[in-house]
Amino acid sequence: MFRSAVWVAFGFAVAATLTATFALGVGLSLLAQIWPAAGRSLLAAAVVEVGVYTALALALVRAFQSSTTPLSSAFGLTRVSPRLLLFGALLGLALHGPADFVEAVVEGFFPYPDAVLVARAERLLPPSSAERVGLFVLVAGFVPLIEELFFRGALFGILSRALAETSTLLVTSLCFTLSHAEPRSWPALSLVALVLGGLRAASGSLLPGILLHAGFNATTLAMIFAHPANAFARSAPSWPLASAGLLLCMGLSLGVWQQRAARAE
């Protein structure tokens, strides 16, 4: 019976993720028919993603949560201590060291074609300052918020009814990773997803994870905007940055779990 519940929950999570991915693809295709440049615009993709994930997250909550449950509770938007919020934001910065190292190692074995690097750089570096500001607001603000509301808000809350905490963390992390189209990014994304899921489970709130996700995305864009050549460059693994980031992540994670233990007493 337990195994059946696990597989049903896993199938439900995968189906919800595939629905979001399919809807995102359809939305981008329709937008590209109206505005051909949208197919190459990360700004347009971010706008469509925000709309798709918002609609699906609300649909999931309304379908599987009691109508009397406040949206804040359904999504896990519960208050936490300022210390946990700070830990989440700092984890978003610290995770770059280990995640970038993993991505650089994978890229060494499976290098991106030059055309892919050029296309990615063009998407990350819009020609006008106004577009860059808009991209930063969306990618570092709205996209992290909406993705967290979907994966570790609505989906995490629904799955936690049928699965143990660890299983819920793993399933939502897998779905989040697979929702991104580039397989070469999956190892690094899975690391970020596991930390996000662990933070959600340990804090009991979505808020620290939103700050982590926003901080991670903001740091990525800030480094690219400050050094545009980085968008075209092939990164090399950096042991010092990875080690420093990993140690900081371990220290911050320990602080998060200590806060959890203190709340449980």
Image (cartoon, rainbow, N blue to C red):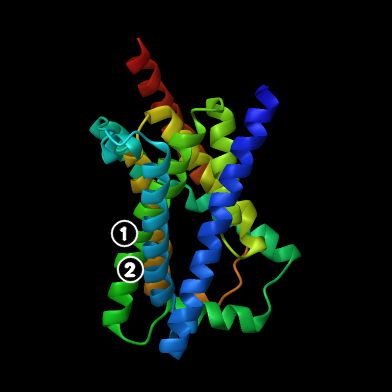
Q: Quadrant of residue 154?
A: top left
Looking at the image, residue 156 sits to the left or right of residue 99; the answer is: left
Quadrant where the N terminus is found in the figure = top right
For the point 60% across and 65% down, the residue is 181
Instruction: State the image coordinates of residue 237 (x, y, percent, origin top left).
Output: 62, 58
Give me the C-alpha separation between circle 1 and circle 2: 7 Å
In the figure, 101 relative to 43: above or below? Answer: above
Instruction: State the image coordinates of residue 202 (x, y, percent, origin top left).
Output: 43, 28
Residue farthest to the right, as pictured:
109
Q: Residues within 10 Å of mark 2 (few under 14, many from 20)?
A: many
Instruction: Look at the numbered disc 2 and give the secondary structure of its residue.
Output: helix
In the figure, 265 relative to 92: above or below? Answer: above
**Residue 141 circle label:** 1
Instruction: State the image coordinates of residue 34 (x, y, percent, origin top left).
Output: 41, 88
Looking at the rendered structure, the kind of residue marked 1 is Gly
Quick one: 253 or 24, which is closer to the camera? 24
For the point 52% across and 47% down, the residue is 192
Looking at the rendered structure, the kind of residue marked 2 is Phe
Instruction: Look at the numbered disc 1 and give the secondary structure of its residue.
Output: helix
Looking at the image, residue 244 sits to the left or right of residue 236; the answer is: left
For the point 59% across and 40% down, the residue is 171
For the point 38% across and 47% down, the residue is 149
- Residue 229 appears anywhere in the view: no
In the figure, 17 relative to 251: above or below? Answer: below
Q: Pointers 1 and 2 in contact (CB under 8 A)? A: yes
**Residue 136 circle label:** 2
